[in-house]
Image (tube, rainbow, N blue to C red):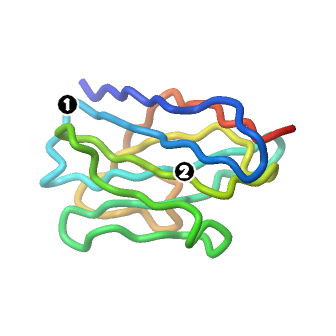
Amino acid sequence: QVQFVESGGGLVQPGGSLNLSCTVSGVDLSYYAIGWFRQAPGKDQEGISCLSPTLGISYYTDSMKGRFTASSGNAKNTLDLQMNSLRPEDTAVYYCGVEAYKCPRGGIVYDYWGQGTQVTVSE
């Protein structure tokens, strides 16, 4: 059974930072890619970043490059997402997902995903 623990969301002012963390159990990341995607109210899902077991970390959206940094967490089977210079348009539910063998095209369709963590950027 694949299970996710996503944490780190919350309310932050524009320009602030948050660090999201995702720990997954029930899969071996030697054979699964793990990534983050988000969904804002009324908008389509948007891929953020993905860690492939063979190709390392990739990013999907130019608007987040340089502001968002994904990295393997200190704990096993963990992927962190450091988000800096947050903007109101970053407000969304952030999801962690895993996909067998490789990162999904577009970064939004995963085999399994968690419940998500809410990020709200507002004054």
Picture residue at 22% right of the left edge, 43% below the top: 74
For residue 16, side relative to residue 75 (left or right): right
Nearer to the camera, 120 or 84: 84
Residue 64 at x, y = what percent?
62, 66
Residue 116 at x, y = what percent?
54, 32
- Do residues under tags 2 and 1 come within 8 Å of each other at their CB atoms? no
Counting other residues with Cα less than 10 Å from the Cα at mark 2, is it few (<14), some (14-19), or many (20 or more)? many
Q: Badge 2 is on which residue? A: 37
- Rendered image: mark on residue 91: none
For residue 42, side relative to residue 15 (left or right): right
Picture residue at 36% right of the left edge, 29% below the top: 4
Three-letter code, disc 1: Gly
Counting other residues with Cα less than 10 Å from the Cα at mark 1, is it few (<14), some (14-19), or many (20 or more)? few
- Rendered image: mark on residue 26: 1
Picture residue at 41% right of the left edge, 44% below the top: 97
Q: Vertically, is 106 above or below 12?
A: below
Q: Quadrant of residue 52?
A: bottom left
Three-letter code, disc 2: Phe
Residue 23 at x, y = what percent?
31, 34
Which element carries disc 1, helix, strand or loop?
loop
